[in-house]
Image (cartoon, rainbow, N blue to C red):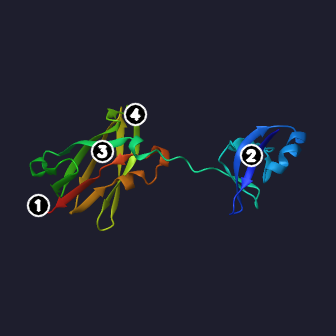
Amino acid sequence: MQYALIKSDSTGLGRVHNVIVADAEFIAHIAPEWDHIEALDTLHELGLGVGIGWGFDLAAGEFIAPPPAAVPEDQRPTIVVTSLTADAAHAAHLVLKGLREVTCPVGTELQAEAELRLAGALVPMDDAFRMPLRSRDGRERVLLGTMTQGKIRFRVTLPESGVWSVTEEAINEAIPPEQRMAFAGLTIYVVEA
């Protein structure tokens, strides 16, 4: 049978230091060396995948999964905006300040293209994802970004004036830590013509 060998800390929680397969006689022999030994004897416990580093609530007798490991900042893929264009009727009035800030008149249909890169190389992934576009006055729109072989496209029609932003925090808020992306941000100033 499998057993989790647990040491407790000052908060009343324990930490799994090892998981072993042993018989009851061996467990009785090593029991004085551990604060708690928990048999992994139910289908639920076996299905959890308990391992070194898991927590254990000594009072409730339940295992606590460790938090997912976050990807270090420098190893996250980065969304890099590569172009910003406007529909034909508004293209002459589009003002770009690099590829992080754009000014355009009300009614513009803006198309953005970007790439998902890791260590400077294109990540050839296909996906679709939600991209929150938030206004300074609290309004929010959600755009659908489509990614084909790491190239991302989204379109948005801007029917009223305001300042709209897409931020790294917003694109990552519904994504697990191990899938988060870096993004320098994009601000769109929509002005009355």
Give the amino acid at mark 3.
Phe
Q: Kindly report the distance in space between the C-alpha atoms of the residues bearing marks 1 and 2.
A: 64 Å
Per the image, the residue denoted by label 1 is 193
Per the image, the residue denoted by label 3 is 154
Under circle 2, the secondary element is: helix
Q: Kindly report the distance in space between the C-alpha atoms of the residues bearing marks 3 and 2.
A: 44 Å
Q: Quadrant of the N terminus?
A: top right
Q: Work out whether 3 lies above or below 173.
A: above
Q: Kindly report the distance in space between the C-alpha atoms of the residues bearing marks 2 and 4.
A: 35 Å
Q: Image point 79% across, 45% down: which residue?
A: 42
Q: Nearer the viewer, mark 1 or mark 4?
A: 4
Marks 2,4: beta carbons within 8 A: no
- Residue 43 shown left or right of residue 170 in the figure: right
Q: Residue lying at the far left in this picture: please name it.
A: 92
Give the amino acid at mark 1.
Ala
Give the amino acid at mark 2.
Glu
Per the image, the residue denoted by label 2 is 45
